[in-house]
Structure formats: C-alpha cells, structure tokens
Amino acid sequence: MVRNPERRTLLADAGLRVLAAAGARGLTHRAVDAEAGVPTGTASNYFPSRAALLAALAERIFDRMAPDPAVLADLGRREPSLALVTDYLRYIVERTTREPDLTRALFELRLEASRRPELRAALGDVLRRGYADDVAFHVAAGLPGGAFEIALLHYAVDGLLLDQLTTSIDAGFDVDQVVSALVSRLVAVA
C-alpha cells in the first residue's frame, strides 16, 4: 500500500464529499480521483478495494468531526450540571451541522453498512468507540446521567440531525429549544 498520509487524507476527504453528494452508489475510486484532482488510479493505490475505501472513510469522518479541545476545555471548567450537559449537546449539534456534508456522509456510511458486513464491522467499531469515549468523558466530568442517558441522547440527536440535514418534518421548533428539551427529559438528575 502506498504510504503518503497527506495524500491519503486528501483522498479520504474527497471520498466523503463524493459520498455526501452522490451517495454510496456514486462512490467510486474514479469519482474520488476526480474530486481530489489526482490522476485516475490514485485512490485505488491507497484503497485497493471498495471495502478498504469505505473503511477509510469511516475512520476519517470521525477525525473530521472531532471536537475542538479548546471548546471542551472551556466547557470543562464549568460546574457539572444539566445546563452544562445541554451546552455540550448544543456544541455537538452546532459542530455536526456546521459541515452538513460530513454528517450526510456519515448517514450514507451507516446505510451502506447495513448492506455490507465488512463496513458494518469497521463502522460499528468506530461508532462504539465514539459512544464509549462519550460515556467516559461524561462520567469523568461528573455530569448527571450515565451510559443509558448518553445512549438516549445519541439516539435522539441522530434523529434531530437526520431531520435537519435531510427532508425535514418542519415541525417549527427551534433547534436550541429541542436540544434543551432532550437533555431535560432524557438525562436523569440525582
């Protein structure tokens, strides 16, 4: 396999753009090459199979969606409370809607994983690691709730993002109001 981390990142980012714009059916090595502006065959050199390309996109998407350590540090200086959980969740929603194509690409990956066992395994590992990291962070920060509440918030936010970034039900509620209600209704207070 070719070893040039910058080129690999360039190709993975191009793949995410293709995935968001054209869906899983439009994701080809040739389409990734064209999007990245590299010679035909480059993506195949880095990701020799469709499974390898999809697995690389599953890893890269979470690098791109990672929180800003400075924002986490600022939030982390506050006293643990339901209001702080709400602000963390607001930050997640803001971060994931700031670059909507990334979140759309993640939805595409999740749908494709339902049809491809090899992607299901790779993406499932990444998703479970992210959830475990979220639970560990939540517990270490002394925030109210626990693993179950974090799972509930994941389920609810995924639905909120799907609605916001695809065809919406247009219920007319402010996203900030929804986030506040999700936390107050789903997170147990001791």
Image (cartoon, rainbow, N blue to C red):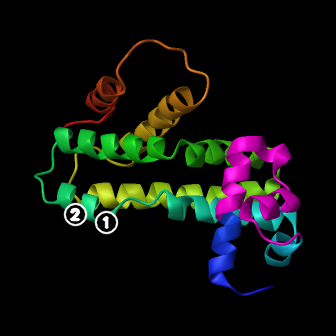
Mark 2 near mark 1, Cβ–Cβ under 8 Å?
Answer: yes
- Left/right placement of residue 143 relative to residue 21 reads left
Kindly indicate the quadrant of the structure image that contains residue 16: bottom right
Q: Mark on residue 73? A: 2
| Residue 190, visible in the rendered structure | no
Left/right of residue 55 with respect to residue 145 in the rendered view: right
- Quadrant where the N terminus sits is bottom right
Q: CA distance from mark 2 to mark 1?
A: 6 Å
Q: Is residue 5 left or right of residue 138?
A: right
Relative to 177, is 127 on the left or the right? right
Query: Where does label 1 land, which residue?
Result: 69
Q: Name the residue nearer the viewer: 117 or 174.
A: 174
Q: Mark 1 belongs to which amino acid?
A: Pro
The 10 Å Cα crowd at callout 2, few under 14, some 14 to 19, many 20 or more, is few
Q: Position of residue 29 (x, y in %)?
A: 85, 62
Magenta span has 38?
yes
Residue at 45% from the left image edge and 59% from the top image edge: 132
Q: Residue at x 31, y 29 (%)?
A: 176
Q: Residue at x 67, y 52 (%)?
A: 17
Out of 34 and 3, give the one closest to the viewer. Answer: 34
Quadrant in the picture for residue 2: bottom right
* Residue type at tag 2: Ala
| Residue 93, x across and y down, in percent | 40, 40
The residue segment tinted magenta is 13-40
